Amino acid sequence: MVGDHICTDMEHSYIIELKYLKSQATDMEAEAAVQEAQAQVLRYADTVNVGENIGHTTLHKVTVVYRGMGMVACEEV
């Protein structure tokens, strides 16, 4: 397995889905982006490639959504 020999002392792996919206985006668009980011990060985590490469680490699935310069959401799914 690739993940087992790259960083043997690493305890955590991360998948981070980042979305950026223009500052004019509505609250509805922001909520849709949050939901889309959550769905994407879960799909990515469920792939064989990820499963084979995280080795013994704990996988964290994180979503971050910005609207302009303001953070709308940042959470672990």
Image (tube, rainbow, N blue to C red):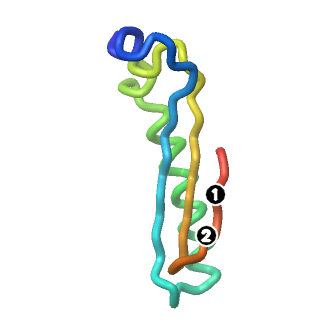
Q: Residue visible at 57% across and 53% down? A: 63
* In front of the other: 12 or 43: 12
Q: CA distance from mark 1 to mark 2?
A: 7 Å
State the image coordinates of residue 56 (x, y, percent, origin top left): 53, 13
Q: Residue visible at 36% across and 9% down? A: 5
State the image coordinates of residue 61 (x, y, percent, origin top left): 57, 40
Q: Which mark identifies residue 74?
A: 1
Q: Secondary structure at mark 2?
A: strand
* In front of the other: 72 or 46: 72
State the image coordinates of residue 49 (x, y, percent, origin top left): 36, 26
Mark 1 residue type? Cys
Q: Are marks 1 and 2 in contact (CB under 8 Å)?
A: yes
Label 2: few (<14), some or many (≥20) within 10 Å? few
Q: Secondary structure at mark 1?
A: strand
Residue 1 vertical position relative to residue 77 in the rendered view, above or below = above
Q: Residue visible at 54% across and 70% down? A: 66
Q: Residue visible at 49% across and 35% down? A: 45
Q: Which mark identifies residue 71?
A: 2
